[in-house]
Image (cartoon, grey):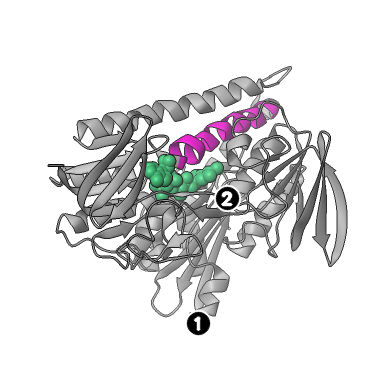
């Protein structure tokens, strides 16, 4: 008789493999099925390879500024093939690490394409044939892929999505990036820094549309200073693909402008991988390509869970992993807390970096809060000046009535590392008093986090 697993996970991205390891730690008998690569999009085609490439462009940028630091660097150039090779190498190093972790935790890892074929049964198809697995609980963690808009479909040659943008064989001379969410802006920043003449088109009224508008405007100014062109409230209606070039029909102020590019990166969002995983077998409900769940990631079918990009936003790796832990603990009979989306930070690793958690100023006002807002500029911080990174802003938003930290928004060097301080504060429901009473080490960029809180209450020292 086939083994009855306590938990079968479909998809080994940061949601699935973390769920599997946590389940095994708790004594569950766990199998995980992956069709392509351990670590999912995050390790192979998302978070990690992009940050590896962005590190190359950041160093390239700093090398151009060598004289500011009393150094010299001549004939600064790059080898695109070597930049890509390093990025792929880092991805594959981490990918094989996941295989070891699963093995160490005695998770049965199976390569193949999995789908639910009846209650408690998963069918796995691979080159080696078809097998059936039995599981008391099923965790769907099949992730998502790039959304493709009609007429703007990628072809890997002139029009790229993230996979082609992560493995370029040539440098775009004139690049159009469609969409200014984190993915679009990170690619725009990478290519612009390495010399592509880059234009970003965003349909909403400000780039990085989920970010606080003031932070977005600050970032926009900086990108423009670096030579990027930004078109807001604009949309690409059509792409004419000619030999070696693309003519984009861009609607701005109700008029169509035609512009020529040699490369287009489409970064217009994601769609969940809901096809062929057997949702219809058990009538598992989905909406607009994402499986519908409650706050504990339970679907409408008992014993079936959905986590990560396949489920509700925010579509971020750390959210996927946290849901994986929560679901494993639920299955093991524990009583985990559900996740609060407003306590999940978002980070964009462009130059300058952007990071935020909680409500934007506009959302806090819309929700009816009477707010206190603090701001502190990087130019007022000793460490930022010492680093040669005096461009940036830390903004904090408090509920004037209770002093609760409602949101924190930052743009500038290393803010993607600093944001975790505010994430902990939000998770612990910290008030302004706790933050003001906290001693921040000197000299650090984090002192700006303190000063921004002090500023919200009229007590900032260094401005
Ligand atoms: C360019 C880019 C940059 C990004 N940068 C960041 C970042 O900096 N920070 C961040 O938090 N997020 C980032 N993301 C988003 C992040 O990658 C996702 O949120 C995260 O990977 C979601 O994890 P997941 O486990 O839900 O799904 P995925 O990582 O997509 O993994 C799903 C896995 O399921 C497998 N699978 C699918 N169907 C089946 C099947 N039927 N049978 C077996 N296996 C199957 C897939 O092969 C895949 O390996 C980025 C994404 C992209 C594209």
Q: CB at mark 2 closer than 8 A to ligand 1?
A: yes
- 46 in the magenta segment: yes
Q: In this view, does 150 lie to the left or right of 314?
A: right
Residue shown at the point (63%, 41%) measured from the top left = 187
Using the image as rendered, state which of residue 459 and residue 101 is in the foreground: 101
Using the image as rendered, state which of residue 296 and residue 372 is in the foreground: 296
Question: Is residue 418 depicted above or below 109 in this figure?
Answer: below
Where disc 2 sits, the SS reads: helix
Question: Is residue 299 depicted above or below 84 in this figure?
Answer: below
Residue shown at the point (55%, 70%) measured from the top left = 361
Tag 1–tag 2 contact (CB < 8 Å): no
Name the residue that disc number 2 marks: 182
Residue stretch in magenta: 41-64
Q: CB at mark 1 closer than 8 A to ligand 1?
A: no
Residue 271 in percent (x, y) is at: 53, 55
Whichever of labels 1 and 2 marks the residue nearer the N terminus, that label is 2
Using the image as rendered, state which of residue 51 and residue 369 is in the foreground: 51
Name the residue that disc number 1 marks: 368
- 405 in the magenta segment: no
Query: Does residue 233 show up?
Result: yes
Residue shown at the point (70%, 57%) measured from the top left = 202
């Amino acid at each position: 008789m086939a083994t009855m697993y306590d938990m079968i996970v479909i998809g080994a991205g940061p949601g699935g493999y973390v769920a599997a390891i946590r389940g095994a730690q708790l004594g569950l008998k766990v199998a995980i099925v992956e069709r392509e690569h351990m670590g999912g999009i995050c390790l192979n085609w998302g978070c990690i390879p992009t940050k590896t490439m962005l590190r190359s462009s950041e160093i390239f940028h700093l090398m151009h500024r060598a004289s500011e630091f009393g150094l010299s660097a001549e004939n600064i150039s790059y080898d695109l093939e070597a930049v890509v090779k390093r990025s792929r190498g880092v991805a594959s190093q981490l990918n094989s690490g996941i295989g070891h972790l699963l093995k160490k935790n005695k998770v049965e890892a199976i390569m193949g394409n999995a789908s639910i074929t009846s209650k408690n049964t998963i069918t796995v198809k691979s080159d080696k044939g078809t097998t059936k697995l039995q599981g008391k609980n099923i965790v769907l963690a099949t992730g998502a892929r790039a959304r493709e808009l009609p007429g703007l479909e990628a072809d890997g040659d002139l029009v790229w999505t993230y996979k082609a943008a992560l493995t370029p064989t040539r440098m775009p001379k004139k690049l159009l990036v469609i969409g200014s969410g984190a993915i679009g802006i990170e690619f725009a920043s990478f290519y612009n820094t390495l010399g592509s003449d880059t234009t970003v088109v965003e349909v909403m009224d400000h780039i990085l549309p989920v970010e606080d508008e003031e932070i977005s405007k600050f970032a926009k100014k900086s990108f423009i200073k670096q030579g990027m062109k930004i078109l807001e409230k604009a949309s690409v209606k059509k792409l004419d693909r000619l030999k070696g070039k693309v003519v984009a029909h861009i609607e701005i102020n109700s008029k169509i402008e035609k512009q020529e590019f040699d490369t287009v990166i489409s970064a217009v969002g994601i769609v969940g991988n809901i096809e062929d995983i057997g949702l219809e077998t058990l009538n598992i409900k989905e909406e607009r390509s994402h499986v519908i769940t409650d706050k504990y990631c339970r679907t409408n079918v008992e014993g079936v869970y959905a986590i990560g990009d396949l489920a509700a936003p925010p579509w971020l790796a750390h959210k996927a992993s946290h849901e994986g832990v929560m679901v494993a603990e639920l299955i093991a009979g524990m009583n985990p807390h559900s996740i609060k989306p407003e306590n999940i930070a978002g980070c964009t690793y462009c130059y300058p970096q952007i990071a935020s958690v909680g409500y934007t100023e506009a959302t806090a006002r819309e929700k009816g809060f009477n707010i206190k807002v603090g701001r502190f500029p990087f130019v007022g911080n000793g460490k930022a000046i010492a680093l040669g990174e005096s461009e940036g802003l830390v903004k904090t938003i408090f509920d004037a009535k209770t002093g609760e930290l409602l949101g924190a928004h930052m743009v500038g060097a290393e803010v993607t590392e600093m944001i975790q301080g505010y994430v902990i504060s939000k998770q612990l429901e910290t008030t302004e008093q706790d933050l003001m009473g906290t001693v921040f080490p000197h000299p650090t960029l984090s002192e700006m986090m303190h000063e921004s809180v002090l500023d919200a209450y009229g007590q900032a020292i260094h401005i």
